[in-house]
Amino acid sequence: MAKPTRQIVIDPVTRIEGHAKITVHFNDQGAVEDARIHITEFRGFEKFCEGRLVWEMPGITSRICGICPVSHLLTSAKAGDDILAVEIPRPAENLRRVLNLAQWVQSHALSFFHLSAPDLLLGFDAPPEKRSIFGLAEAHPDFARRGIRLRKFGQDVIEKLGGRKIHPVYAVPGGVRAPLSEAVRDEILAGLPEAHDTAAMGLEFIKAFIETNHGKLDVFGNFPTLFLGHVTGDGALEYYDGFIRVVDSGGNIVADRLDPRKYNDYISEAVEEWSYLKFPYYAPLGYPQGNYRVGPLARLNVCSHTGSPKSDRELLIFKQMAGTRNVVLNSFYYHYARMIEILFALERMEELLTDPDTLNQEDIRARAFSNKPHGVGACEAPRGTLFHNYTVGRDGVIKKVDMVIATGQNNLSMNRTIRQIAMHYISDPETEITDGILNRIEAGIRCYDPCLSCSTHALGQMPFEIEYRGSDGTLLKRGGRG
């Protein structure tokens, strides 16, 4: 009698942004040999942007993502600056920086308090129906409420500058569309003390959680890779401009002061037939040896300091965990790094808002026509380094677009993380797959806060499939939720 097929049900939603499935591959001895996250959707922005004007691109590409539209807006505008061959006025740069910092706050708060905190406060094995922001609000109402309000603060700043919380059309090639009034500036400043208090609460919580659960977190993406991110000329944490720095897992600087506009010189992309998401890698080391991580963990690993007092103190504590290496390898620490970056964003936001240049009511945009056939913009999105690369005609019409998205740059590491977790928790194909095991695999992905769809359908049922395959590729069983 044939053994009945077992169905694995994962419920409620996965708390990732986008559509994905996971396959676990076994060798002939029945042990887990590989695990893959498959991104099964295709967007096509690089293709259908062809034929549009460069001035339209910030508004169009901000639609790529409903969670971090500001990142695409700013990076696109910077590519436009390059094509116009202009240096934008300092007030405009200050306002773009504030917008990007607000994006960090709202996106990091969403990732930490809404998507990952249920695992941390309720437990990876908590009942699925409780393991959500709603369950968190029921069990820990003050923690959830403050996290929601922190995200709202970031969204409110984006709305005050850009006119709306999602898809603001504010930055344009050459600068920004509108100045900031003193009254609105003061409204933003008034919200900072509460935001600081919540950031401090989240930071103390994640530090205590890591200290208490240290041994249990060693399989959440704990392996050597390169790390890549922006730094200033003196090595400080940078989020809008600056240079690219690459460090290895020993804390050694592999490359420094790289020009973001020449990213094609040191970043290449590989493709695999089982995923629409590309696999960027550090070109000098080849594929896949050139695997690198981006985002909060990488940024704190590549920088020497933040340049702001509170976050500098926290960065020092963070780096002490790395010992003599000076870099933290465990991807679970993305959560910790996210909270430090929120603190940094709030500090830097206050510095910029109290700069008199930020309230300049006239000098906010440099106007020019298309002066270069090629332009590249880069900045640090919440999930990592983002590049937009446009080729245009003399009339400013887009001929070619290349975008290297932050989530894609963590693709190799995300796959390696779920493989590490699967190997630890699944000894053979007959291992009972509990919801807790599946949730831990998902949690490994959530460390990176991937935005798989880069669109606005973050809430609701999201398909999540897991397949077991033998060494010859035979499907052994399939389960999931959808």
Image (cartoon, rainbow, N blue to C red):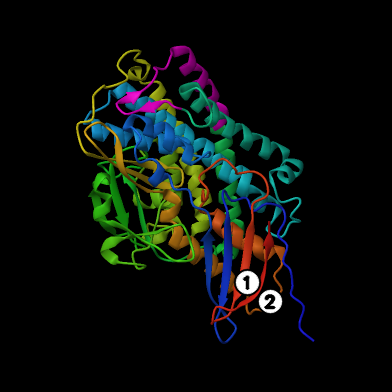
Kindly identify which numbered label has been placed on residue 425. 1
Q: Nearer the viewer, mark 1 or mark 2?
A: 2
Q: What residue is drawn where x is 27% and y is 53%?
A: 264
User: Which secondary structure, mark 2?
Assistant: loop
Name the side, left or right, on which 218 lies relative to 181.
Answer: right
Toward the viewer: 251 or 138?
138
Vertically, is 258 above or below 153?
Answer: below
Q: Quadrant of residue 101?
A: top left
Mark closer to the chain start, 1 or 2: 1
In the rendered image, residue 190 lying in the magenta stretch gets the answer yes
Name the side, left or right, on which 98 lies relative to 53.
Answer: right
> 10 Å neighbourhood of mark 1: few (<14), some, or many (≥20)?
some
Q: What residue is drawn where x is 62% and y is 50%?
A: 15
Vertically, is 297 above or below 241?
Answer: below
Q: Amino acid at mark 2?
A: Thr
Q: Are the residues at dot 1 and dot 2 in contact (C-beta closer than 8 Å)?
A: yes
Residue 55 picture location, percent across and down? 34, 29
Which quarter of the image is occupied by the N terminus?
A: bottom right
Residue that sits furthest to the front in the current view: 51
In the rendered image, residue 115 lying in the magenta stretch gets the answer no
Q: What residue is drawn where x is 43% and y is 65%?
A: 272
Magenta region, residue range:
169-195
Gap in angstroms between the C-alphas marked 1 and 2: 9 Å
Q: What residue is drawn where x is 70% and y is 36%?
A: 142
Question: Can residue 310 be seen in the rendering of this structure?
Answer: no
> 10 Å neighbourhood of mark 2: few (<14), some, or many (≥20)?
few
Which quarter of the image is occupied by the C terminus?
A: bottom right
Q: Quadrant of residue 62?
A: top left
User: Which secondary structure, mark 1?
Assistant: helix
Q: Amino acid at mark 1?
A: Tyr
Q: Which residue is mark 2?
A: 431
Residue 292 picture location, percent across and down? 38, 59
